[in-house]
Image (cartoon, rainbow, N blue to C red):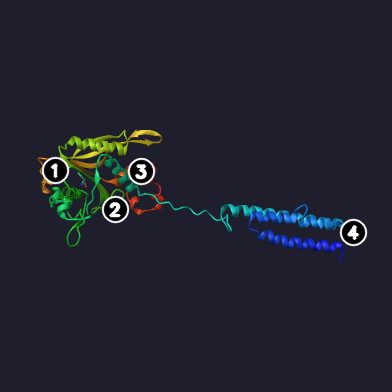
Amino acid sequence: MSPKIALLDSLADIEQSALIRISTTIKTKDLEALRISLLGRKEGKLSQILKQLASVEPSERKIVGAEANRVKNALIAALETAQTNLAYTEEDRPGSLDVTLPERGRWQGSEHPINLVIKEVWKIFQTMGFTRARGPEIESEWYNFEALNTPLDHPAADEQDTLYLKNSGLLRSHTSPVQIRTLEANSPPIRVLAPGMVYRRDTYDATHTPSFHQIEGLVVDEGITFVDLKATLEEFSKRFWGSGTKVRFRPSFFPFTEPSAEVDVKRIVMREGQEIETDWIEVMGAGMVDPNVLENVGYDPERYTGFAFGMGPGRMALLKYGVTDLRMFFQNDVRFLSQFSHKSVR
Ligand code: PHE
């Protein structure tokens, strides 16, 4: 075999085996060792070939030299490609990485807006010394109506409004029965907040749902007056709705409070970059605990007085977050629900 043919054969062998080894190397440092063994000035396989060029007929050296150059460039290109691919995989994760795959979104849960409101209301009353109270959702007529000074022929007790259970009992139509249960199980001073679900035979539309949340408050002690009611609810309203909020107490009627009031707020909100005052919005029912209620649970109304209030965190969430349809809170569409977080409260 002529030296020319022998060298061209060696070059072909080197190229073939080198390309395989380059493409199967998975560590950057192995790739570098491979590069030196192939292209290194002294020991590199290609350099060894070129050293033998002297043995080739002068007229044929050009052919062998050109082929050696082509192989060298092919190996350099293959080493570079392998190097960039390795840089990716080694940085990100072992094995292969398909960088063309779409990113997998991270699932992040968020708190329900009504729960956010309940939490915020609770935090405010907690700083005023209130504790949590709770009662059952299935109630008797006594706790839901009669003990609350509401005779059963009162329209609220009508089947049109209240969901009665088959044999006995009903689904509480407000959280006020928790007042009675709290008074029974404790003695003054009483200062409780009771959030919970209530049920009514209501339509399901933008402003009504047949089950909804209420937050009840009750304070009973010696010497509690309407001034305490006003001060507490005004302080709460400013802390919940913003310090610039105006609060108004409007005479109203509830069977279990006397006198009774509806609490309205006038808020300051941002509209198109401008601070504006809203109209008066009704946000709460309240009043001094009716002496008949205290008597129903064995309290002496000459000695003890108190006030109670009830609010709807669903409606409050509508107002606070500018949502226009109450049903959004119950459809559990994550695109809607994920917009609320503690940070966005207010
Ligand atoms: N229970 C009343 C309602 O559901 C609200 C209320 C609670 C009013 C406490 C006064 C005192 O409408």
Mark number for residue 204? 2
Q: Are marks 4 and 2 in contact (CB under 8 Å)?
A: no
Q: CA distance from mark 2 to mark 1?
A: 33 Å
The disc, 4 or 2, on the residue closer to the chain's N-terminal end is 4
Which numbered mark, 4 or 2, is in the foreground of this view?
A: 4
Say which residue label 1 marks.
290
Circle 1: element type: loop
Q: Secondary structure at mark 3?
A: helix
Would residue 280 be seen by someone viewing this image from the given angle?
no
Instruction: Report which residue position mark 3 lands on.
Output: 321
Residue type (three-letter) at the residue carrying disc 1: Asp
Front label number (4 vs 1)? 4
Query: In the rendering, at what x and y percent does residue 119 appear?
Result: 31, 45
Q: Is residue 184 above or below residue 125?
A: below
| Relative image position of residue 325 (x, y in whole percent) | 33, 48
Tell me which image quadrant ligand 1 sits in. top left
Checking the image for residue 57, the label placed there is 4
